[in-house]
Amino acid sequence: MSSPFTLTIDWLAFTLPSGSAQDTMQMLGGDWTKSATGFRGYPASWITASASRGVGKLGTRAPRAPLEVHVDLSAGIVAPWPSGKVRTILQWILKQDGHLTRLDCALDDRNSCVPLLTIRQAIEAGQCVTRADRMQRISSSSIHNATPSGETLYLGSPQSQTMLRIYDKRLESQTKQREDWQDYGIRWELELKKDRAQGCGQVLSYLEEADWLEFIVGVLRGYVDFRATSRDEEDEFRYRAPLLDWWLLLTDGFKKGRLVVEKEAQ
């Protein structure tokens, strides 16, 4: 039986200081169409789409830097890429002296071994040890019949270089009527920006793909840990308290998991 713990690279954005839009589009693949409008201050832009789920945009010819190329690829574009292609693209970006501006890494607990309620209760009990200062919970449901359609826990700020989203991917996919909704469970999604994205991308570019999971789990645990402690304890004790059993089970499962290529939604 294949592991229920998986890793998917889920978003990629980068800037090349000097590049060709055509060469970049050829490297990325896909069908690109010239847009009539600009993109993030770049007057010349192109767009690509993937099965109505993902959108990719490329912008260039900014007056301040005419040769600069910026690319933003959402989950529906990047998630179906084989890991080998992700690694090749990362190596190519770095070879062009490019800088990653965003990189999302999605760790999926596909059997929902650790329910969202368990995670939320641990955070509320002060058992979450993290450098993030903010936790936000957003729930959604049907107005007509009160059926839940989603819940997401956010750790960190959208303005920070690291933010963690934890949500019920199965429920979200079911609400969107995706045929493969049963393949999902609880998703732990790291959104890395600027220097954090660049550092992670540099490591993934040379690390063997078999070692990606252990590295990303290290990035996750560098940002958040769940320990047998409380808010009343001193920080020195909090950071040394024993790890919670479910957190050990989950992170060990992720380390032994598998890289996956998402199927394109039809």
Image (cartoon, rainbow, N blue to C red):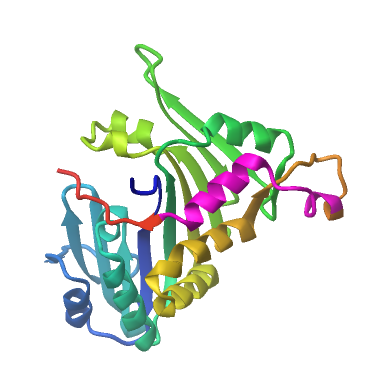
In this view, the residue farthest toward the front is 1
Residue 161 in view here: no
Give the residue drawn at x 55%, y 51%: 251
Q: Taking 204 as reference, is 235 above or below it?
A: above
In the visual, does 176 lie left or right of 107? left
Q: Quadrant of residue 143?
A: top left
Q: Taking 28 as reference, is 222 above or below it?
A: above
Residue 84 in view here: yes
Q: Position of residue 25 (x, y in %)?
A: 19, 74
In magenta segment, residue 242: yes
Give the residue drawn at x 36%, y 84%: 65
- The residue closer to the viewer here, 111 or 29, is 111
Give the residue drawn at x 86%, y 44%: 233
Magenta stretch: dominant secondary structure: helix
**Image quadrant where one finds the C terminus:** top left
In the visual, does 152 lie left or right of 260? right
The number of callouts visible is 0
Instruction: Please state the extent of the stretch shown in magenta in the rendering.
Output: 237-257
Give the residue drawn at x 66%, y 52%: 132
- The residue closer to the viewer here, 229 or 53, is 229
Q: Position of residue 144 (x, y in %)?
A: 34, 12
- The residue closer to the viewer here, 56 or 38, is 56
Q: Position of residue 108 (x, y in %)?
A: 42, 47
Q: Position of residue 15 (x, y in %)?
A: 37, 76
Q: Quadrant of residue 83?
A: bottom left
